[in-house]
Amino acid sequence: MNDINGEVSDYRTIYQKAIEFGFQALGSQVSKVVANYLSRKYGMTIADTFSKPDSLGEALEGTLGAGALLIERRIVKFIYIQISSPLNDSNIQLRTRQDFGRYIMDSQALFQETRG
């Protein structure tokens, strides 16, 4: 396996652990509701959102309303801590699901830069 694939794989692990961390606040029943929403609307699992994080943001907002921002913030914060980024909690500006997707994509790029 080459380094790029290894990096993506490592980042995917961070992403999956971040989702698990974020979903801990929801509990198993609400997490299942979000997963069901993703499955019905997009035909994807939570793990599939790695390549389309906006869909996870939309599923969270569709099921939790404004409460989705709390879970999205937990996920983003976890990722940035894992990649040792200086992003402070107060610097995380999540106003739309596109913001969530942007943070995920930016963190992946940052991960690859710092590992490359």
Image (spheres, rainbow, N blue to C red):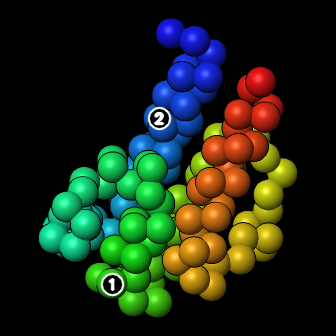
Where is residue 4? Give x, y as percent.
Answer: 61, 22
Q: Which quarter of the picture shows residue 114?
A: top right
Looking at the image, which is closer to me, 43 or 16?
43
Whether residue 51 sits left or right of residue 98 in the image: it is left
Mark sitting earlier along the chain (2/1): 2
Query: Which residue is pictured at 45% across the width and 50% down the height?
Result: 51
Secondary structure found at label 2: helix
Q: Is residue 105 left or right of residue 16?
A: right
Q: Is residue 93 above or below residue 10?
A: below
Question: Helix or strand or loop: what does disc 1 sit on?
Answer: helix
Q: Is residue 113 left or right of residue 32?
A: right
Q: Which residue is mark 1?
A: 62
Give the percent coordinates (x, y) of residue 73: 58, 69
Tag 2 near tag 1, CB within 8 Å: no
What residue would you read off at disc 2?
Answer: 13
**Residue 86, above or below 53:** above
Res. 28 in view: no
Identify the disc placed on residue 77.
none
Look at 55% across and 20% down and name the residue there: 6
Q: Is residue 78 left or right of residue 23?
A: right
Residue visible at 29% across and 82% down in the picture: 63
Quarter location, residue 45: bottom left
Q: Nearer the viewer, residue 61 or 29?
A: 61
Residue 50 screen position, x and y as percent: 44, 49
Identity, as a three-letter code, of the amino acid under mark 2: Thr
- Residue 65, can we see it? yes
Outermost residue toward the right in this view: 86
Q: Amino acid at mark 1?
A: Gly
Q: Position of residue 30 (x, y in %)?
A: 23, 72
